[in-house]
Image (cartoon, rainbow, N blue to C red):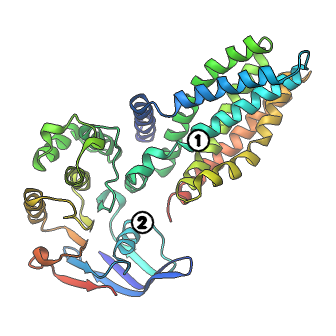
Amino acid sequence: MIRARELSKRFGDKRVLDGLDLEVPRGGFVLVTGPNGSGKTTLLRLCAGLAAPTGGELGVQAPRAAIGFLGHEALLYRELTALENLDLYGRLYRLPERRERSGAMLERFGLWRVRNERAGTFSRGMLQRLALCRTFLHDPDLLLLDEPFDGLDAEGTDLLHQELAERAGCTALVATHDPGSLETRATARLALV
Amino acid sequence: MSGYAADVAALARKDLLLELRSRETLPAMLLFVVSALTVFHFALPAGSSARAETGLLWIAIVFTALLGLGRAFAAEREQGALDGLVLAPCDRSAIWLGKTLGVTAFLVLAELVALPAFALFFHSLSWELVAAVALADVGIAAIGTLLAAMAAASRARELLLPLMFLPLVIPVVIGGVGASVAANPGSFLAFLGLYDAVFAILCWASFEYVVTE
C-alpha cells in the first residue's frame, strides 16, 4: 500500500530523511521509532500528501478519503464545539449520516457529555481523544498516527487499543517513542536514526 | 447543492461562525477603518480635492483589508487545522474559495461602516465609488487570501503578507480612485472587473500548490 524508494526530504540545508526504502503491504502495521528529529513525523506527512519529497519516489495506494492522519496537532478548531468540529469534517468527507457517526465516535471516546463544549476548553487528553475521533470518523483504510497515545490517560489508552483492535484490517504506520504496547500488533518495525 | 458548492458553503459558514464566537477580526477592522478616516479628516486641509479625499478612502480600505487578511488563517494555524482541510477529499480550491467568501464578507461589513463615515467626513458617495469598492473587494479578497495562506506557513508572516500584498493591490487602488473621480468611470470599472477575473482564476488554480510543503 505504501512503497518508498530512496525517499529523501530536506528542509533547507537539513536533510531529515535520506534514501529511505520502505514497503508496507495492505493490512501491514508498521511501528516507526527513532529519536527526536529522525524524521518520523516527516515520513507520516509525506505519506499523507501534506509534504512533497525532495528526492526518491513515494507511492501511496490510498485516496485522500481513505487516509486517517493523526498529527502532533489536533487539526481542529478551538472555537467550534466537539460536535461541530466532527460535523465539519463529516461534511468535507461527504459522510452519509454524519451526525450519527460523529455522535457515535464521541461516545466511543468518552466525549459525548462534552459534545457541545468548545474544543479550546478541552484538556490535552480530551483534545487528543477528539483528534482520534476525527482521524477515525470516515473509516480510513490507511492510518498514519503520530504519537497516538500522547496525552491520553489510562482509559483513553484502552479506548485507542480497542479501536485499533477493531480496525485490525487497516494498514497502519504508527510513529511512537513508546512502542511497547503496540509490539504485539506490529507486523514490522522501522527504526529511523 | 453540488458537492463543490456544499464544501465551499461549509467552509465559509465555519469562518463566519468562528468570527461570531471569537469576535477578533471584524471589530478590529471596524475600529481601524473608522479611526483612519477620522485621522484623515483632521489631517487633510480644508478645501482639498475630491481626488485626494477618495485616495485616502482607498488607503483606509486597503489597510483595513490587510488587517483582516493577517488573521484570515489564524484559526487554522492554532491547531494545524489547515492540514486537516488539505487532507479532506474535497477540491483544495474550495478551501480558498470558502475563505475568500469569508474575507469578502468581513470587508463588506467593514465598508458598510466606512462608506457612511467617509460621506460624513468628506463628500457624498457616488454610485461609481460604491461599484468600484464592491469590485475591488473581490480582487482584494481573492489575492489576499492566497497570499495569507502562503504567509501563514512562514515564521515571518506579519512581515511577508504586506510585502507581497501591497504591490499586488496597487492596480486596485489605481482602478478604484480612477473609477471614483475620472470622467469615464466605465473603463476603470472594467479594469477592476478584469483584475478580479484574472487574479481569481490564478488564485483558484494555484491554491493547491500553496498548501503543500
Q: Is residue B63 visible?
A: yes
Q: Residue at x 38, y 78 (%)?
A: A37
Quarter occupied by the N terminus of chain B: top left
Is residue B90 visible in the rendered image? The answer is no
With respect to residue B97, does B188 lie above or below? above
Which x, y percent locates residue A167? 13, 63
**Residue at 11%, 47% in the rendered image:** A110
**Left-right relation of A73 to A181:** right
The reply to whether dot 1 and dot 2 touch (C-beta < 8 Å) is no
- Give the residue drawn at x 69%, y 16%: B117
Q: Nearer the viewer, residue A178 or A142?
A: A178
Pinpoint residue B147: horizontal percent, then vertical percent: 62, 50
Residue position for label 1: B69
Q: Amino acid at mark 2?
A: Gly
- Answer above or below: position of A36 versus B108: below
Q: Is residue A106 left or right of residue A22?
A: left
Instruction: Determine whether A18 is above or below A9 in the image.
Output: below
Mark linked to residue B168: none
Q: Chain of mark 2?
A: A
Q: What's the CA distance linking mark 1 and mark 2?
A: 26 Å
Q: In this figure, which residue is indicated by the disc labeled 2?
A: A49
Residue type, numbered disc 1: Leu
Q: Hey, which quadrant is residue B133 in on the image? A: top right
Q: Chain of mark 1?
A: B
Question: Mark 1: which secondary structure?
Answer: helix
What residue appears at the point 22 percent right and 84 percent down from the top-left corner? A189
| Rendered location of residue A19, percent (x, y) | 43, 88
Judge by depth and name the residue closer to the eye, B13 or B198.
Answer: B13
**What kind of element bears circle 2?**
loop
